[in-house]
Amino acid sequence: MTGALTAASKSFDIPHPTKEGFRLRYGVLEGPEHGVYVRGIATSKVIELPDYWTGLVHENSITIQLTPIGSATLHYLVKIEDNKIYIDSETSVINVSFFIQAERKDVEKVLIEYKEQD
């Protein structure tokens, strides 16, 4: 394959992995993997992942970033289980923004480096 793709934006559009008759469209975040993410604000100790993540990502690839809101309080990951992220804090009060990412399992891994062919 030769050539280059140049676009103002990219996305993937696939059959929905957990809902019959639906499709799933995501914008593309670029990096050394086919990754997806969710982000938001949490004020409770459980963050529910989108229902389709069970069919879309490798569970062992999920990573979480937590940023405290309002004051510098240590927040931390307790566990990932049943498509939920369990978190806590040193004060037991939760008020964080979160960024959760994972690698897609429905596509081939990215070949990151390879030798040019003549």
Image (tube, helix red, strand yellow):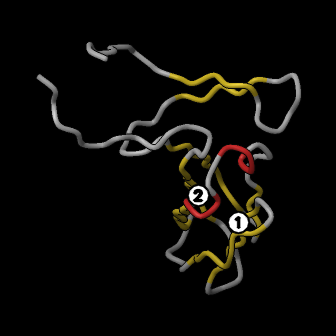
List x then y, in percent, for residue 8.
Answer: 39, 15
Q: In the depicted view, which residue is nearer to us: 95 or 37?
A: 37
Q: In the depicted view, which residue is nearer to us: 58 or 97?
A: 58
Q: Is residue 44 left or right of residue 58?
A: right
Residue 61 lies, with reference to residue 14, above or below; the image says below
For marks 1 and 2 on the same chain, the one whose residue lies earlier in the sequence: 1
Residue at position x 67%, y 43% in the image:
56
Among all residues in the image, which is located at the extreme bottom? 90
Q: Give the residue pinned by disc 1.
A: 85
Q: Give the residue pinned by disc 2.
A: 98
For marks 1 and 2, give the CA distance. 10 Å
**Quadrant that contains the C terminus:** top left
Residue 29 lies, with reference to residue 55, above or below; the image says above
Give the amino acid at mark 2.
Phe
List x then y, in percent, for residue 30.
Answer: 39, 36
Pointers 1 and 2 in contact (CB under 8 A)? yes
Residue at position x 68%, y 75% in the image:
79
Element carrying mark 2: strand
